[in-house]
Amino acid sequence: MTGDDRLARRPDDAGRPEEVLVDVETGQLVHRPRPSPLGAVDWDLAARTAVALVPAGPRTSRYSAEQVVGELTSAAVRAEGPVREVSGLADGMPIPPAQIVDRPGWIRAAAGSMSELAGRPEPGGRKPGRAAGLQAGAMLGFLSTAILGQYDPFTGPDGTLLLVAPNIMSVERALGVSPSDFRLWVCLHEVTHRVQFSSSPWLGGYMKNTVDILGDVGDEPVTAMLQRLVADLRERRADRNPPSDDPADRGVIGLLRAAQPPAQREALDRLLVLGTLLEGHADHVMDAVGPAVVPTVTEIRAAFDERRKRAVNPMQRLLRALLGMDAKAAQYVRGKAFVDAVVGRVGTANFNAVWTAPDTLPLPAEIEQPQHWIDRVLG
């Protein structure tokens, strides 16, 4: 009998970041970190698969490529000052350099981050899944063509700021906007994410614990999840529980949410609300810096928003739905409206109470009702 064979799950520990098991031979309780669902993925295989699938970026000369790298490196540093001034966060903290990467570089970094988030596999635990690795690789390959930048709070002591040069070049050409202004504008958004986490050290742990809870369904049979999903679909068909305008209640994410038990559904809601806040706040800051920093910011925002609305072919639409990209796009709009409203009513300093602790984050209903957040948190 192996060590894991001797251990039985205690029935009342579902939804906790740590699981409590009972050694059936000794009767003693054993505490250990709850395994992450991401650990079932072979992330090395996922990275290799994605790199093999990803198309090349836009054609450019070596000189132009080096120029883009240099300008993005400089823009990431220049963005820090306006971001700190507008947001009122992270003042006086050191400025770590950004990493300028190509699509394969982003893929390897993203796979490494997901592996770090999952944690090292326990000896004798389940082995990383090859099939899941191939599927994750296909997903990363598709996403690597769309990501402009990303702040990763889970790698390195200060996190890592990534800027994907070929994607930034591709979008600025498609929009027909000033390359220098667009590159700085993108950096303003991503640097805001870095400042959010560096000024709120608890955020990274909160996100990781929530991801762990989201993926732990214990020993619940699949039939229980299917029963919840069928019941939800019946209620929607009878119009007793129609989907709201919240993207979390529609599409693939809505179905996933309907199938989950309460603890996991609440965890998903917390992640979605956190993402809405982070993205909305970053969009608020990147626009609030104004034309003194980015002269063509108004033109860039108009062109970028118009691009989000453009029709895509059916296959792209399907992939976007499956990967939740349309829901993420809605996060920017809803989150920015929330931040704009709160800052407009109480000012930036009072809004920044949102970064104090998990209890000061907005509740799902408060995203659409910012005054409710103001009343609850600021009194």
Image (cartoon, grey):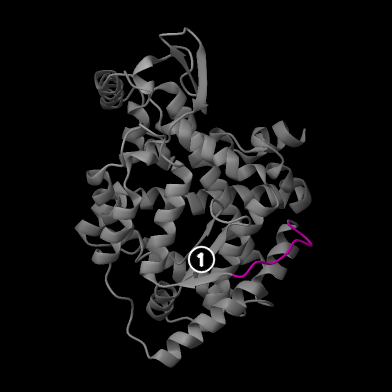
Q: Which residue is mark 1?
A: 162
Q: Where is residue 379 drawn, in percent x and y?
A: 77, 32
Residue type at mark 1 is: Leu
- Relative horizontal placement of residue 340, taking residue 345 as reference (left or right): left
Q: Is 202 part of what is drawn in magenta?
A: no
* Residue sitting at x 47%, y 86%: 66
Residue for point 35% across, 59% down: 143
Q: Is residue 73 visible to us here?
A: yes
Name the quadrant of the N terminus. Answer: top left
Foreground: 102 or 371? Answer: 102
Q: Residue at x 39, y 34 (%)?
A: 123
For this rendering, which residue is in front, 135 or 229?
Answer: 135
Looking at the image, residue 364 sits to the left or right of residue 227; the answer is right
Where is residue 85 drawn, in percent x and y?
75, 64
Looking at the picture, does residue 193 appear above or below residue 58? above
From the viewer's side, name the closer residue of 26 and 148: 26
Residue 368 in view here: no
Q: Which residues are magenta?
A: 90-97
- The answer to which quarter of the image holds residue 247 is top left
